[in-house]
Amino acid sequence: MTETLLDANELVLNMGPQHPSTHGVLRVVLKLDGEKVTGTDCIIGYLHRGVEKIGENRTYAMFAPYVDRMDYLAAVSNGLGYCLAVEKLLNVTAPPRAQTVRVILAELNRIASHLFWLGTHALDIGAMTPLFYTLREREEVLKIFENYCGARITTHAFRIGGLYYEVYDGFEAQVLAFCEMFERRVDEYETMLTENRIWVDRLLGVGILTAADCLELGVTGPMIRASGVAWDLRKAQPYSGYEQYDFDIPTRTNGDTYDRYMVRIAEMRQSVRIIRQAAKNIPEGPQMAKVPKVIKPPVGEVYVSVEAPKGELGYFLVSDGTITPYRVRVRPPSFVNLQALDRMARGALIADVVAIIGTIDIVLGEVDR
Amino acid sequence: MTFLRKILLGDLWQGLKLTFRTQAPKNIYTEQYPAERPKVAERFRGAPRLNINPTNGETLCISCDLCAIVCPEKLIKVTSVRNPETRRKDLVNFTYDLSRCMFCGLCEDACPVDALELTQDFELAGYSREGAIWDRQMLEEGPHPQRFV
Ligand code: SF4
Ligand code: SF4
């Protein structure tokens, strides 16, 4: 914003940090020409907690609960990525039973995250009802988490090397019952939104991002898939046994807000498919690999990334052979995806900025860390 | 067909039908919290408790300090004295700063004798930061939340 001298027609407007549609404490400085957006500038950092630095001051096992607090809507995926990174550093793999339970919980978490996105995004656009329905279904997922590990949001469900908690009696039945119920519920969301003329008018052709833009900006997750690139780390570099499951990568071609909605809806259905396959045969056996009590990985560095609900979530860990990491770096999907905001919002109307911020699906805890 | 549908607001009626169906009393999902206390899961990680041996009323804690070491927030303080007769450590005080706890459960996992446990109590609001620092007595008795309903 510094380089320009404002001309008389230009108006600068601060959106946020206290704005209900910025999904947290994001501040967007909008340059406006009438109703038209001519430029945006994101100011972030209001929720900065120094997670990476905390990681460098904690032992490997102690840092695990903190990663849940980055993307608090997808705490399980965060924990999974971190555990996989440390396991790679230690050169151990979690036993098959642990991997399967991890997949189930991570996919449930993907559903929960998408549900929250759908509810709040619809609320931003002006459809209030879907929020109540999506939160109702998300509650069922949170109940499964609560039964499994005792916490609903910041779960700390996995430990380095596998699982700490045994699955409880009736876990499979509860998960499968959820799948059964949930598929019908996705149809209900579609009944309400997919053909709704207001919804279509507000989303179709808004915030177009081409595949080339996505690749250039490093955008991942549902956003790149809506632009026609079938890039999904679960297929591209399978982890935690994802290669065993049969699922598709939903893609669309237009790369607008409506397509991103359709991709996320389709992803929820695919997640149900994966959960069904996994929950039907959870292998018997140990659930914890042999991991020393005091984790002291050899000197080295790893980068491990997982497909979190919002995109590629990567952990870069450098070990100097002591009990604490030398460097922790997190590649959060929301942070990278947020960069696409400027490109999508330029030339749009000011009312569409709300839709565009919503469609990125950011969590400010993860953007700022 | 689609034209007719458009004129007759077919897409909107479809959504409205769903909305009204959900209003049937059997579909109400809201919890009436203070009036009805929800039942949390068995493994719920809530208020901490220091367990005592039910037969003789002594504490189970052996003052090994493992929970304090493993806690990422370093909020547990265990004080003990060595008993010259039994050569064991006797617990003197145990403070637990709930205001900093993130209920991750690492301390509970680390305890070798299941003395420290995170229980199903979830009503932990207080009026001061000092009130959130629990001592041994408080940890053994558990919280006494005031009920207003
Ligand atoms: S639950 Fe976690 S943060 Fe709280 S006292 Fe135990 S180890 Fe520390
Ligand atoms: S780990 Fe258990 S036994 Fe050891 S000091 Fe803590 S509460 Fe007491």
Image (cartoon, grey):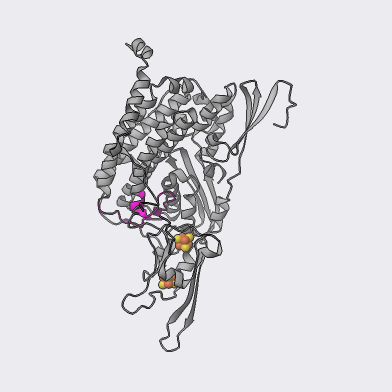
Q: Main secondary structure of the magenta part?
A: loop
State the residue in front, A117 or A102.
A117
Q: Quadrant of the N terminus of chain A?
A: top right
Compared to A355, does B51 lie above or below? below
In the rendered structure, does residue A33 fall within the stretch colored magenta?
no
Q: Is B132 on the left-hand or right-hand side of A252?
A: right
Relative image position of residue A302 (x, y in whole percent): 49, 49
Tell whether position A154 is magenta. Answer: yes
Q: Position of residue A314 (x, y in %)?
A: 48, 44
Residue A125 image position (x, y, % from top left): 48, 28
Left or right position of A2 against A53:
right
A11 versus A46 height, above or below? above
Q: Nearer the viewer, residue A365 or A143?
A: A143
Residue B111: quarter of image: bottom left
Can see residue B74?
A: no
Magenta extent: A145-170
* Image-based side of A268 in relation to B127, left or right: left
Look at 47% across and 26% down and name the residue there: A257
